[in-house]
Image (cartoon, rainbow, N blue to C red):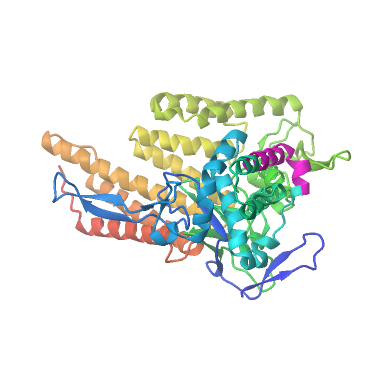
């Protein structure tokens, strides 16, 4: 084992340390989840093991020579109708037992406003802990639920789980469920398991969307930092934890439980509400935090930035923890004008809401115009690394794709990449996505240029797209795919689907560059 658990530090409690020196990209451990579940019925993932449902080529009935991709899956014959990758997964004893309770779980989750897939994962764990009792007790059964902390830090969420437990239990009693099975759904058992899931579960993301939720033991042992040196990824229901920074023997190993691109306040709030702790890493303990929230200082002769210092306040009456925000400038040591901060923050809130509507999907021209005007008004008021800029450039890149103005889209995508690198300061999946996106945009630009030249040839007219420019676009696409693959190999490993897909894109551009010959018009 490449790590050990040190419990001598009373301040942080459990501390996972490396047993040896490790270079970035090294596999720390691989772990199969105790229980996992897809977070969407349309995700083409197996309901039990979360593996991708295999796509097969099938001939169409109308044209036997034509082939189309179809998803091969097995639909549950026990009653729930969910899809599985094989008969083996569908007939697994855990699913056979949970299947008869799925309908009532769905009903109770709707009634009490509980996320359906969270409720289904909860159901699976309640069943599986009895089927694999020894494994449960030796692994995830040791994890803390932090139920008492939820009473003070997130009482609304806890009350909702308690109502869900009561409602589900009521339905099962009315259904005259056998007593031995009904004991699986004890009120406290349901609530404690819900608390343990939200505290310790890990989600898999694809295209910035969480697609699975899994319950892991080893991964939950790692402490959190907003400057982590480890990164986790998924392959079906298996989690791999890799080192993304070179590490010496006895270095503490940190993972991240939150979106690292968020400003300090949002990260701390998420940690407090779902994990019940206040982060004290370097990013969270200073005003700067990569300047994700920094706005211009209006102190006399000061050319610096003011930013919020996030603290915590304990309520002596109920023991709850709340966040405090103190704006100030570290250069002129002045306290920020409340009216100045409020004025800019109000503008930023309004701007963020506008961006999040993604109105470019309906009218990209209007979106580009309005977003550009607002950003020009904020230009000298917010730091070049401000989180609002990240959102702005991301949405502008998407808007220009809609307009098929790929050069402009590439410009904004490159700014997003710069901002992401500035914040993360290590190799992570977010950076893979940035490089891959830029590579795809250059490839789209090349394809668009090819179509423009073909149209020009058909109309016997000249085109302004030069052959050299087209070759350059293809070369740039290849370069960014290579960069994405380099980072993916560190974060995911060479054999992960992320890495192999990028390898395929690299080969495709290699072949295209070797084959393409573009004659001047």
The quadrant the C terminus occupies is top left
Instruction: Indicate yes or no whether the magenta region holds residue 163.
Output: yes
Q: What's the magenta bit mostly, secondary-structure-wise? A: helix
Q: Is residue 471 above or below residue 8?
A: above
Measuring 28% from the left and 57% from the top, which residue is drawn there?
Answer: 508
Q: Is residue 224 left or right of residue 118?
A: right
Per the rendered image, the range of residues in magenta is 148-168
The quadrant the N terminus occupies is bottom right
Classify residue 347 by image quadrant.
top right
Q: Is residue 178 left or right of residue 99?
A: right
Measuring 59% from the left and 72% from the top, which residue is drawn there?
Answer: 22
Where residue 175 sits: x, y (%)? 58, 42
Where residue 190 sits: x, y (%)? 67, 48
Res 216 seen here: no
Single out the residue that lies furthest toward the right.
Answer: 316
Q: Is residue 296 above or below residue 62?
A: above
Instruction: Indicate yes or no whether the magenta region holds residue 381.
Output: no
> Which residue is at the front of the view, 360 or 348?
360
Res 4 seen here: yes
**What is the number of callouts on the image?**
0
Q: Is residue 495 above or below residue 56?
A: below
Where residue 429 sits: x, y (%)? 50, 54
Measuring 14% from the left and 34% from the top, which residue is drawn there?
Answer: 461
> Which residue is at the front of the view, 405 or 40?
40
Where residue 242 sits: x, y (%)? 55, 65
């Amino acid at each position: 084992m490449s790590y050990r658990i040190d419990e001598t530090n009373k301040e942080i409690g459990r501390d996972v340390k490396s047993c040896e020196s490790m270079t970035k990209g090294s596999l720390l451990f691989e772990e199969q989840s105790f229980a996992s579940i897809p977070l969407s019925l349309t995700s083409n993932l197996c309901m039990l093991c979360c593996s991708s449902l295999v796509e097969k080529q099938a001939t169409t009935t109308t044209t036997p020579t034509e082939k189309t991709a179809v998803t091969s899956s097995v639909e549950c014959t026990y009653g729930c109708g969910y899809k599985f990758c094989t008969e083996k997964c569908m007939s697994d004893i855990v699913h056979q037992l949970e299947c008869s309770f799925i309908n009532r779980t769905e009903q109770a989750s709707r009634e009490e406003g509980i996320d359906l897939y969270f409720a289904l994962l909860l159901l699976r764990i309640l069943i599986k802990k009895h089927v694999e009792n020894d494994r449960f007790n030796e692994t995830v059964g040791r994890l803390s639920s932090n139920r008492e902390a939820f009473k003070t830090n997130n009482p609304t969420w806890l009350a909702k789980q308690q109502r869900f437990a009561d409602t589900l239990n009521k339905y099962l009693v009315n259904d005259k469920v056998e007593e031995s099975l009904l004991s699986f759904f004890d009120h406290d058992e349901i609530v404690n398991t819900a608390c343990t899931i939200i505290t310790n579960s890990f989600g898999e993301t694809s295209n910035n969307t969480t697609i699975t939720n899994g319950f892991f033991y080893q991964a939950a042992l790692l402490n959190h930092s907003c400057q982590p040196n480890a990164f986790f990824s998924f392959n079906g229901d298996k989690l791999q934890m890799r080192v993304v920074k070179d590490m010496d023997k006895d270095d503490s190993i940190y993972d991240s439980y939150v979106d690292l691109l968020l400003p300090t306040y949002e990260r701390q709030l998420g940690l407090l509400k779902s994990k019940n702790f206040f982060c004290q890493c370097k990013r969270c303990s200073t005003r700067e935090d990569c300047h994700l929230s920094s706005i211009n200082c209006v102190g006399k002769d000061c050319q610096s930035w003011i930013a919020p210092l996030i603290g915590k306040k304990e309520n002596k009456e109920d023991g709850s923890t709340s966040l405090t925000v103190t704006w100030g400038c570290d250069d002129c040591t002045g306290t920020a004008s409340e009216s100045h901060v409020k004025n800019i923050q109000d503008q930023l809130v309004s701007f963020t809401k506008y961006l999040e509507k993604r109105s470019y999907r309906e009218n990209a021209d209007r979106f580009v115009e309005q977003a550009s005007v607002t950003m020009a008004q904020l230009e000298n008021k917010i730091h070049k690394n401000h989180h609002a800029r990240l959102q702005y450039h991301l949405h502008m890149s998407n808007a220009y794709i809609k307009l098929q103005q790929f050069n402009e889209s590439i410009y904004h995508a490159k700014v997003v990449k710069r901002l992401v690198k500035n914040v993360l300061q290590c190799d992570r999946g977010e950076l893979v996505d940035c490089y891959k996106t830029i590579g795809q945009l250059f490839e789209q630009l090349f394809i668009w240029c090819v179509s423009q030249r073909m149209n020009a040839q058909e109309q016997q007219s000249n085109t302004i797209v030069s052959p050299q420019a087209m070759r350059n676009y293809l070369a740039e696409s290849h370069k960014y795919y290579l960069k994405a693959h380099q980072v993916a190999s560190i974060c995911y490993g060479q054999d992960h689907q992320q890495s192999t897909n990028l390898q395929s894109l690299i080969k495709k551009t290699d072949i295209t560059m070797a084959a393409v010959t573009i004659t001047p018009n």
